[in-house]
Image (cartoon, rainbow, N blue to C red):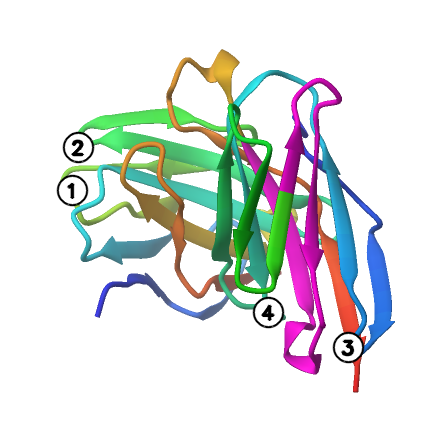
Amino acid sequence: SQQGEEDPQALSIQEGENATMNCSYKTSINNLQWYRQNSGRGLVHLILIRSNEREKHSGRLRVTLDTSKKSSSLLITASRAADTASYFCATDAQASGNTGKLIFGQGTTLQVKP
Amino acid sequence: EAQVTQNPRYLITVTGKKLTVTCSQNMNHEYMSWYRQDPGLGLRQIYYSMNVEVTDKGDVPEGYKVSRKEKRNFPLILESPSPNQTSLYFCASSYHNSPLHFGNGTRLTVT
């Protein structure tokens, strides 16, 4: 069952612009994570935000979480060509009873043009 | 170096020929999991394991088996592969409720 749904599915921007990706989910969560995947490679963890947090920063990344709307956004500022990748949100549903089961969305494919 | 190692990276096989994809982690993680990734469907969880000898089904377990006899290893077994199991497979591990570390993937083709 899909928990996280990313929007948009694909995004193309120029280098230096900001990129915003959104994630919506269906059930209450313990935390929400964002991962990055370069083409055909394993996913790499970017940032984790807990259900009692509203915003988190890491370098050029900014993540927000709105539990009332069951949504999160990932903002990449001053994008670079090297940011070209797919980005996934993943949720750890409270209903899973703290099993640690993580459910991934379908991802947003970001292309940053030099 | 902390890592999750999957083997093989690429595998082409025929329908019905049993195969095993190995996964090993050197971080002493309790939690391990297998995912498959297909175009338009994202990552779907096949099986996961909370610790040694503790495994549970994910969202798409049919046609797969796993075992967790040792903490570091979590092999994925396809007893009788079928073409619909052609996919990109990822193993991942973590401490409980911590971010996942992924392997580099195994691209499986079943003809």
User: Are discs 1 and 3 both within one chain?
Assistant: no
Dot 3: element: loop
Question: Which quadrant holds residue B43?
Answer: top right
User: Residue beneath label 3, please?
Assistant: A16
Q: Amino acid at mark 3?
A: Gly
Under circle 2, the secondary element is: loop
| Residue assigned mark 1 | B71
Q: Is A90 covered by the magenta stretch?
A: yes
Q: Are marks 2 and 1 in contact (CB under 8 Å)?
A: yes
Q: Label 4: how many residues lie within 10 Å, few (<14), some (14-19) or many (20+)?
A: some
User: Mark 2 or mark 1, which has the lower sequence index?
Assistant: 2
Dot 1: within a 10 Å radius of its alpha carbon, few (fewer than 14), some, or many (20 or more) residues? many
Task: Where is residue B51? Give x, y as percent.
Answer: 21, 31
Q: Residues within 10 Å of mark 2 (few under 14, many from 20)?
A: some
Instruction: For residue A2, say whether it is visible.
Output: yes
Instruction: Identify which amino acid the numbered label 2 is placed on.
Output: Val
In the image: residue B26, left or right of residue A80: left
State which tag comes first along the sequence, 3 or 4: 3
Chain part drawn in magenta: A64-91
Along the horizontal axis of the image, is A101 left or right of A80? Answer: left
The C terminus of chain A appears in which quarter of the rendering? bottom right
* Quarter holding residue A32: top right
Q: Which residue does the numbered mark 2 point to in the structure image?
A: B52
Coordinates of residue A5 in the picture (x, y in percent):
74, 36
Q: CA distance from mark 1 to mark 4?
A: 28 Å
Which labelled disc corresponds to residue A38? 4
Image location (x, y in percent) of residue A57: 54, 51
> Label 4: chain?
A
Mark 4 secondary-structure assignment: loop
Q: Amino acid at mark 1?
A: Lys
Pointer 1 indicates a residue of which chain? B
